[in-house]
Image (cartoon, rainbow, N blue to C red):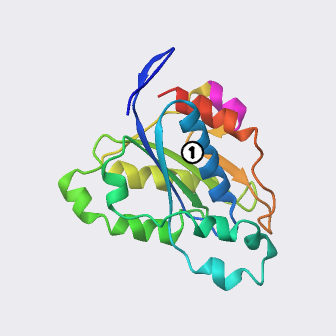
Amino acid sequence: MSICLDRGVIDLKFLVLFHTVTGNNYLIGKQFTEAALESGHEVIIRRIEDKTMEELKNTYEIINEYYEEILNVKPVTKEDLADQDVIVLGSPTYYGNCSGKMKSFFDSLVDFWVNNTLYKKKLMTFTTMGDINGGGEMCLKSLITLGQHMGMQFVPVSPSMTQKGISSYGIKHFVGELGDKRPTKTLKRVIKSWIDSL
């Protein structure tokens, strides 16, 4: 679908793919989805399945806030990636890296690697972490590395954007030890600026 806007015809297809337990990466993924739609793009949002949410929802009350809403998002399939122009990856930071669930999903894409299925698709990234020393930049770099090995092209972050809450490697959000520091709605303006730089 093509949409005619002041800056020309925009017909990019976005996939926003997130992994979440407490819901924060889902909320950032929603902001990416809304910002891309507002900029005239087609968007689908998908989740990495993780039964940890169900196992921990009675221990961490914060999980229940968006639990049902998250389950209503379709789990990702390999085919979801094939027809997209831009793929947005969002992962929690685990031990200074992307989550094992995100890595396992990409490990299952060996046929895409062989066939260049994702070659030259645009890549954008985001992560959440417990605190400022949680290894968020390393997680973002690991997501970029996954994409680069698939032949994807990371959408560069302009130096001016790094003064507005975006790392040079993507979006970072600190959620606190209990995961209850939710992303603010002002983050969407920053995300939209990045998307509009495409």
Q: Residue at x 64, y 81 (%)?
A: 54
| Quadrant in the rendering for residue 179 | bottom right
Q: Give the mark count.
A: 1
Considering the whole magenta stretch, tell me its main secondary structure: helix
Q: Residue at x 70, y 30 (%)?
A: 163
Check residue 161 for magenta coloring.
yes
What is the span of residues highlighted in magenta in the rendered image?
160-165
| Quadrant in the rendering for residue 105 | bottom left
- The reply to whether residue 33 is in sight is yes
| Residue sitting farthest toward the top | 6
Q: Residue at x 70, y 51 (%)?
A: 173
**Residue 112 at x, y = what percent?**
25, 58
Q: Which residue is mark 1?
A: 33
149 w.r.t. 179: above or below: above
162 w.r.t. 139: above or below: above
Check residue 186 for magenta coloring.
no
